[in-house]
Amino acid sequence: MIVLGIDTSCDDTSAGVVENGQRTLSNVVHSQVKLHHPHGGVVPELASREHLRNIMPVVEESLSRANIRMSDLDGIGVTVGPGLVGSLLVGLYYAKGLSYVHNIPLVAMNHLEGHILSIFLEEEVPLFPFVALTVSGGHTNLYHVKGYGQYTQIGQTLDDAAGEAFDKVAKILGLGYPGGVVIEKLALEGDKDRIKFPRAYLSNDSLDFSFSGLKTAVALYVKKWHKSQAESRELTSADIAASFQESVIDVLVNKVMKAREKMSVKSVVVAGGVACNNRLRTKLLEAASSEGIQIFYPRPEYCTDNGAMIAVSGYHRLLHGERCDLSTDVRSKYPIQELSPVISCQHQ
Ligand code: KG4
Ligand code: ZN
């Protein structure tokens, strides 16, 4: 079964073709980073206009790289939420057009389910049940995953997402947008123990996150630092980046390990843009190996927003008989708990 997945939920126009929910035939992403960079964040109106310009060439490129024609497709999965409404609309209406004109079944997808299932594009996949952390610019959530479509949210951020904190701190340090990659690079030259930024573990039992206090602490610290340059000349923005990054990662690792213990599972999946961070990967692997736990990371191109992950979840939902029609609309908020379970014998 060959499925085309389309995602335009935020600032990446992406389309991927996947066979049997596992084998990537193509994965094309048009990034809008350059467009939003001068604004220090995603400007929704610019994003949707840019999606309009790129959706057709991106989908065509995904078919041509997969070496297939439209008539070879068994289905199309398209993200309808959560995300920016104007951006989502472009993907959904283009997919509706393709489905109608070429008579291909269409299914409406949840972006977060795509991130969780992106691990199934890899050779090594986890057995159910597992704990999943989706950590990106828009989300920081923990799930107990019992099977395809069977997700219980067990933790969430109460304010900023972890990626959002990276982006805001990068802006404070004058490093531009997006912040994750530049902070990680700069942190390599800094001393992570130089400044003890706060770690919001909340209550001992909580699996929720909070990153806005940390962001404010960094902003205040940088303000003070700028005023007292003479006294703290030896301190660098690399030290601030490294100390900030360590604080985010300590919290993520702590909560992931707590979640897996609470749910009594042996496997953890970490997905979303922040999962590209090598310091996070190293620290989590260290913590997990001492407890005999397996951590699964999709490769970076499957961690950031992409169409292939939407094709994976599309495959399982199409197989399960789900379809949507021309009346389907986008949803800026789309809690994953509203999804129906999918019965599938694969990997169970
Ligand atoms: O999953 P994604 O592409 O889009 C959303 O759904 O948000 O994630 C983008 C986010 C941005 O906030 C970016 O700063 C962050 O992921 N990010 C990283 C790294 N690469 C991307 N954060 C930390 N370290 C990285 N290496
Ligand atoms: Zn995402």
Image (tube, rainbow, N blue to C red):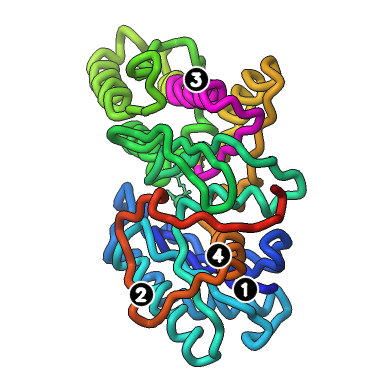
SS type, badge 3: helix
Residue pointed to by mark 3: 254
Foreground mark, 4 or 3, reads 4
Image point 71% across, 50% down: which residue? Answer: 347
SS type, badge 1: helix
Q: Does residue 333 appear anywhere in the picture? A: yes
Q: How far apart are marks 3 and 1 (CA)?
A: 39 Å
Foreground mark, 1 or 4, reads 4
First along the sequence among labels 2 and 4: 4
SS type, badge 2: loop
Image point 40% across, 48% down: which residue? Answer: 337
Label placed on residue 62: 1
Labels 3 and 1 touching (C-beta < 8 A)? no
Q: What residue type is labelled 3?
A: Asn
First along the sequence among labels 2 and 3: 3
> Circle 4: is it few (<14), some (14-19), or many (20+) Cα within 10 Å?
many
Which image quadrant is residue 293 in?
top right
Q: What residue type is labelled 4?
A: Arg
Q: Distance between the residues labelled 2 and 1?
A: 24 Å
Residue pointed to by mark 4: 317
Foreground mark, 3 or 1, reads 3
Q: Is the magenta stretch mostly helix, strand or loop?
A: helix
> Circle 1: is it few (<14), some (14-19), or many (20+) Cα within 10 Å?
many
Comparing 23 with 12, the one in front is: 23
> Circle 3: is it few (<14), some (14-19), or many (20+) Cα within 10 Å?
some
